[in-house]
Image (tube, coloured by chain):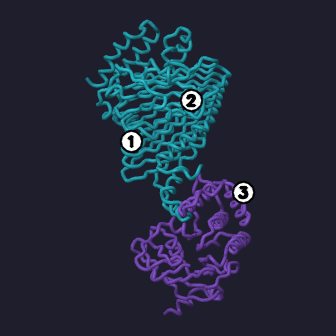
Chain colours: A cyan, B purple
Amino acid sequence: MDLKEKLVSSFMAFEERIDTSSALHDVRTNAIKNFENKGFPSKKEEAWKYTSLNAILKNDFSVFPKKENSVEFAEVKKYFLHEVDTYKVVFIDGKFSSFLSATTHEGIDVCLMSSALTKPKYKIVIDEYFNKIANKDETLTSLNTAFALEGAYINIPKNKIADKPIEIIYFTTGVEDALMVQPRNLVIVGENAHVQIIERHQSLNSNPVLTNSVTEIYAQKRAIVDYYKIQNDNLTANLIDNTYISQKQESRASVHTFSFGGNITRNNLNFYHFGEHIDSILKGITIIGEKQHVDHYTLVQHATPNCESHQNYKTIIGDSATGVFNGKIYVEKEAQKTNAFQQNNNILLSEKATINAKPQLEIFADDVKCSHGCTIGQLDESAMFYMQQRGIPKKEARALLMFAFCNEAIESIKIPELKHRITKIIASKLEVKLGFDL
Amino acid sequence: MLSIKNLHASIEDKEILKGINLEVKAGEVHAIMGPNGAGKSTLASIVAGNENYEVSQGTIELEGEDISELAPEERAHKGVFLSFQYPVEIPGVSVTNFMRTAINESRKAKGLADMPANEMLKLIREKSELLEIDRKFLSRSLNQGFSGGEKKRNEIFQMAMLEPKLAILDETDSGLDIDALRIVANGVNKLKSKDNAVVVITHYQRLLEYIVPDFVHVLMDGKIVKSGGKELALELEEKGYDWIKAELV
């Protein structure tokens, strides 16, 4: 039985475990039908031209783990932003870990998706937001929706500011030979509200993992959302991240994606505008080697006038790794006075390293400022010699150049401890001790 | 200080230096002049360790030690400094951070601990005043968007920070207006001592009015064809290089 068949047949078993009388039942049933029709995407589809899932789909993934593993905090402390107090929503092999989590209902909700989906008091919110901005046609999003049960539920009411950053961490422990998990997050940020969120998927073992995650984020009027994704997983972990962001007027949403590890990583990041004077910020740093594969597939849908979007993706690829950047900016006819910028710079460190870069601009309004820039190159030899001449050894000179290359996306991290952490991860990727800070 | 013997070098099989001999002693200032394409910048680059050139024959000694096999940074740690004709822009790295890294890497190579931050700041303040550099300038990305003159002044600022034994100034005067030229030359003169040496590469005699050489060499077609005192520079300025060519025939 291949994975698609296995998933479709598991759906019935899954439905028996949950409440089939709820309105969610129809949502899930439609979703599994869409997945059953479309199956996993293949390279024949334009959107998946450069990323093949075939090799990973050959694994016999368990969809529901039979056993449970516990994890000691000391083992996983390093994956948390432990220097600073945070709210934490933590999952182990797809199941909530109350032991590792620090949730809250005081003024703001930082808790479990499973509660929100099942408890009556959340029904109004779920009816209004769940699976609304997510693309119902997209097959992997549908697959996630069909099985959506666990994940983080974050609701910051009007005029509230989340007093601490929120960490959402999914650990896998190797409880099964191969495990597929499908986290589902819902983030609602009310008018004038503000939140900072860090999301991470971390495998603690070398057994293959496939994570198919969906996150819906709603930024209401003048809301500020800063979302950080840390992807520094091991070489047997695969991640398909589908993030959908709905923004109302004068809201500002930023997503930083730090892709340093994993086997295959695909980031589908989608911004939709519903109001004027919206600002969307997409930043990415990708540093990969060996045979890693990272694919950034972004969409900014400008549907309303006077909005801005800023994309800046920096990629450094070594060994025989492959990077993909497919960035689409869509400016609808009504979206006059749009300012949409996209920058994608790539450095290839070896002969076998590959980047497929495809900027796409579709503009139907006539009074807009849109630009895109894409560069692919090697490290500047003359800059290397210049730095060495001043006494900086080759390895450090390389690192300094690469740091400088990524600097813009590091500088804009608003949580100082996270900035420090990312800087340290980058330093370890570049195999240098930092004698400098940027 | 610097002793170059029978240096032959090529790039992509094209021979550029065809047997250079040069002796520079501590406390001396040497000027190397010559027409375009003679090999002046190549010589500077090779002494600094640029790996793009193939050295086929000859030796380069610094204080009696053969440095021709050393990496550029190792030469820098031993006191070689090259002021680039075209300083490279490095976006994202501030002048201050670059200098801090350079100085601390050099100290590390000598087995010393990092320079304490307050000492570093003091040094930066002192040297930036010497070259009349605005402090705001130091937090900008290295050479990015600098004017030609600013880049050159920044090179000499770095030289002042690093206090090399042997400084090679490659066309440092190009792109400088007269005020900047005076500031740069003044900086170089203040750094000069009996223990270090300066090699000035230039097309024009102009800079040599401010940085007065003890010796002037004429480099043509990969060889030093004539050497003399500072009056040779004046003669070259007046008569060009053709008369030397005529002498060689």
Kindly identify which residue carries mark 2. A197
Residue at image point 58% right, 66% down? B86
Q: Residue A78, position in %: x, y?
A: 50, 35
Q: Which amino acid does label 2 sit on?
A: Ile
**Nearest the eye: A201 or B16:** A201
Which image quarter: residue A14? top left
Q: According to the image, label 1 marks what residue?
A: A292
In the figure, is residue A368 to the left or right of A317?
Answer: right
Chain ID of residue with mark 3: B
**Residue A281, picture quadrant:** top right
Q: Distance between the residues labelled 2 and 1?
A: 26 Å
Q: Do the residues labelled 1 and 3 touch (CB within 8 Å)?
A: no
Q: Mark 1, chain letter? A: A
x and y, in percent, of residue B65 in the image: 49, 76
| Residue where numbered disc 3 is placed | B135
Q: Is residue B94 left or right of residue B5?
A: right
Vertical comparison of A265 with B11: above or below: above
Q: What amino acid is at disc 3? A: Arg
Earlier-in-chain disc, 2 versus 1: 2
The one of A415 and A280 positioned closer to us in this rendering: A415
Please provide percent x and percent y for residue A172.
41, 28
Q: Which residue lies furthest to the top in this view?
A: A21
Badge 1: few (under 14), some or many (20 or more) residues near its Cα, within 10 Å?
Answer: many
Quadrant holding the N terminus of chain B: bottom right
Q: Tell me the amino acid under the disc marked 1.
A: Gln
